[in-house]
Image (cartoon, rainbow, N blue to C red):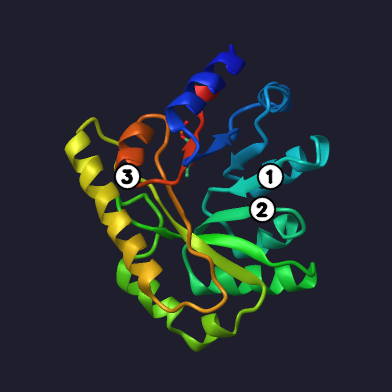
Amino acid sequence: MIEHKLRLIREQLGDKVQLVAVSKYHSQADILQVYNAGHKVFGESKIQDMTQKYQNLPKDISWHMIGHTQTNKVKYMAPYVSLIHSVDSLKLLSEIDYQAKKNNRIIDFLFQIKIAQEQTKYGLQKQELWNIISSEIFLQMKNVRLRGLMGMATNTDNPLLVKEEFLYLKSVFDQLKQMQVPNNQIDILSMGMSADYQLAISCGSTMVRIGSALFE
Ligand SMILES: *Cc1c(COP(=O)(O)O)cnc(C)c1O
């Protein structure tokens, strides 16, 4: 069943859009089913859960942190995390840089931009993003690499609003790519979940985060 869903989703994504299988509510057995069907990129929203799964599951899985992250927990994922989607402050990024250095790694990350109207969604405003990337502190970080942006659209059945939010994020991404940010490789736009990934792809997404449409 999961194998079949994975195949259908992959057909829709084609070669240009990467899939993060969001396993946050799912067991290690479920993850192994997807893994055995040939998929090795998983997203989790809690560091403790991700670390436990990392320890118990095959070591060639790439683990992505997609949830709001507390600074004091960064150390648990720093040895192995492959992409952090949810960086929303300079303080958090400083800790990631520090822990990456301790582990002798360079950790890839995305800035999370707030595009939804709901109060509950985390993320930076565009101006805060520009302030961070032009700050001296950011310019001196050696153990993090900016790969792009992530955003979550409003949870609504109004596709016009969702489309507007996605196109806004794409425009910020395009502006970011034009900037001279040292030591970075800006090529990932993480946007789209189970309910809206097709729309996200039509708006320029390069990475979708899919949980329920795959696992349920
Ligand atoms: C849970 C979650 C997803 C996946 O949501 P689905 O609707 O189950 O596909 C994607 N992104 C983030 C940030 C999430 O927390």
Of marks 1 and 2, which one's residue comes earlier in the chain? 1
Res 102 → quadrant: bottom right
Closer to the N terminus: mark 2 or mark 3?
2
Which is more toward the observer, 127 or 181?
A: 181
Residue for badge 1: 62
Q: Residue at x 59, y 30 (%)?
A: 25
Q: How many marks?
A: 3
Residue 82 badge: 2
**Which x, y percent locates residue 103?**
79, 67
Instruction: Residue 153: give its label.
Output: 3
For the residue with label 1, is its CB less than 8 Å from the closest atom of ligand 1?
A: no
Q: Amino acid at mark 1?
A: Ser
User: What element does badge 1 sit on?
Assistant: strand
Label 3: which secondary element: loop
Q: Amino acid at mark 3?
A: Ala
Q: Give whichever of discs 1 and 3 has the lower sequence position.
A: 1
Q: Position of residue 37 (x, y in %)?
A: 68, 22
